[in-house]
Image (cartoon, rainbow, N blue to C red):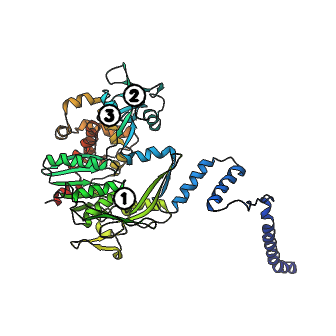
Amino acid sequence: MSKNRTLIFIFLPLVIAGCIIIGIYLGAFLTPSDINDKTLIFPQNKRFNTATKLNEILNFIEDAYVDSVDKQELTERSITSMLATLDPHSYYIPAKDFDGMNDPLEGNFEGIGVEFRIKDDTVLIISPIVNGPSDKLGIKAGDRIVKVDTTNVAGIGITNEKVIKLLKGPRGTKVKVDIVRQGSKKRKHFTIIRDQIPIFSIDAPYMIKDDIGYLRITRFSKTTYTEFVEATQKLKKKGMKKLIIDLRGNGGGVLGTATKIADEILVKNKMIVYTDGRTRNRDEYFSTGNGTLESCDIAILINENSASASEILAGAIQDNDRGSIIGRRSFGKGLVQEQVVWPDGSALRLTVARYYTPTGRCIQKPYGTNLEQYHAEAYNRYENGELLSADSIQLPDSLKFYTPEGKIVYGGGGIMPDIFVPLDTANGTIYLYELRYKGIIQNFALNYVDKQRRTLNKQYKNAIIFKNRFKVNNDLFNSIVKFADENDVERNLEEIITSKKLISRGLKAAISRNLFNDFGYYVIINDYDKTVQKAVQSFK
């Protein structure tokens, strides 16, 4: 027995080792058996290069893959994946998505000209576009579209995408709509001739105080410059000598629009921006001296979501010591894309150059191949405390630059504001954030205005009267709390009390927006916005 155990201990390791070696050998020998023994050789007499290789691979997959594939979809996914390895801002636009992505840059689209929401499975018109085809026919806010041509759109689970597809169309074409107006059971029939509808990018231009004007630029489209000039001229007639330009949340757009707006502010022969790329010559943009705001004091508001063309404008003002940049560090996009539209209606936006502010800094933040991490960097700023304290911001000294007046500015990570304003978290609670996240305040305000629109319009002729007279009383406040209960927001009395002023303020502004569009919202909210108020103070 003892002898047998000794033999086992001696030979067992040898047996195991032998099995492993045989297994490796058999594995190497047998693995190719899963591959068809018929090997295909690409014909030597056919032209072969990288482009041919990609096309042949796609053809081979389509012809021979074990399951059926959609070659077009596979091709588009391949293009998307390929571009993602270059940088975070080069990307492919499928033909079906092109209009939706390109219209905001063009500054217009073709349709009937209404802003709508799906409410109670019905298309509710929030606001007709002023002087648009629907507005000219007498279609009003609060009207409900129940039929488009021969398609019923009420009570069928209609989606935003389907409504847009039904209402948009080439300029000059006709579309029939049936509308139900509140207080009337009878349908109204309209035949609307589609037209070119502006997508406005200048929000709420108004005199915020004495000689101080305010306006918000939501994007830089091809029509933004014209809108900007028209808005500022109206403000100047009202006595504006100082201007707050709000670029918070503005993700950019057309570079040329940003340079034109900067030209309105800078005196002659000041550099605005320059671009440079491997296959693109250096292109410099200078002010002409024909600007209408050269003597106007300027404050520009930015935050972590201000990017691209927003940063070009902010950088031009900062590097020329022309005004104050107020808020929090901007996104950090210093890459320039060119768009190519293909015959099938798809498009490619490819990074071809970097742009540099007048002091010579490129504000592009570092990037790799992890796009999620790149775009989540704003959240990481919150995590590391940067949004609450300027001391938490770490920018490399090697990318330090100086303005003509000796002010230090940095490259490599967005525009650092001259005046830092932390994220306002006072009286913020989980209850309040849940109301905002779930859209409770917006939905409640929409329902409230929908039921009270006639009464509210009679009582409050404009947004200023509404701002000064309307109060969120206890009954209205309790109603929104009840509405939140019904929409799965757990009631927390302590947090409700803590955030009551913020909830009431947000509700009042949301109601005003439903009555008087974006101007109605900002004329209320800006009175409590610490960044806006810091800008007002900066002029002193």
State whether residue 446 is above or below residue 152.
Answer: below
Q: Earlier in the sequence, mark 3 or mark 1?
A: 3
Q: Amino acid at mark 3?
A: Gly
Q: CA distance from mark 3 to mark 1?
A: 31 Å
| Foreground pick, 450 / 233 | 233
Considering every residue shown, the one lying at the far top of the view is: 186
Rendered image quadrant of residue 324: bottom left
In the figure, is residue 40 to the left or right of 128?
Answer: right
Q: Is residue 193 visible?
A: yes
Callout 2 secondary element: strand
Can the viewer see residue 534 in this picture?
no
Q: Are marks 2 and 1 in contact (CB under 8 Å)?
A: no
Question: Who is closer to the viewer here, 112 or 52?
Answer: 52
Kind of element beneath mark 3:
loop
**Which residue is disc 3 drawn over?**
132
Whole-percent x, y for residue 525 in the image: 24, 47
Residue occupying the point 25% across, 43% down? 519
Residue at (78% x, 67% y) in the render:
27
Look at label 1 and name its amino acid. Answer: Ser
Dot 2 alpha-carbon crowd within 10 angstroms: few under 14, some 14 to 19, many 20 or more: many
User: Circle 1 is placed at which residue position?
Assistant: 308
Tell me the quarter of the picture where residue 520 sits.
top left
- Dot 3 or dot 2, earlier in sequence: 3
Q: Which residue is pictured at 67% across the width and 56% down the height?
A: 56
Q: Nearer the viewer, mark 2 or mark 1?
A: 1
Taking depth in this image into account, of 430 and 149 the one nearest to the observer is 149
What number is the disc on residue 145?
2
Query: What whole-number distance in Å separates the C-alpha atoms at marks 2 and 1?
Result: 38 Å
- Which of pointers 3 and 2 indicates the residue nearer the eye? 3
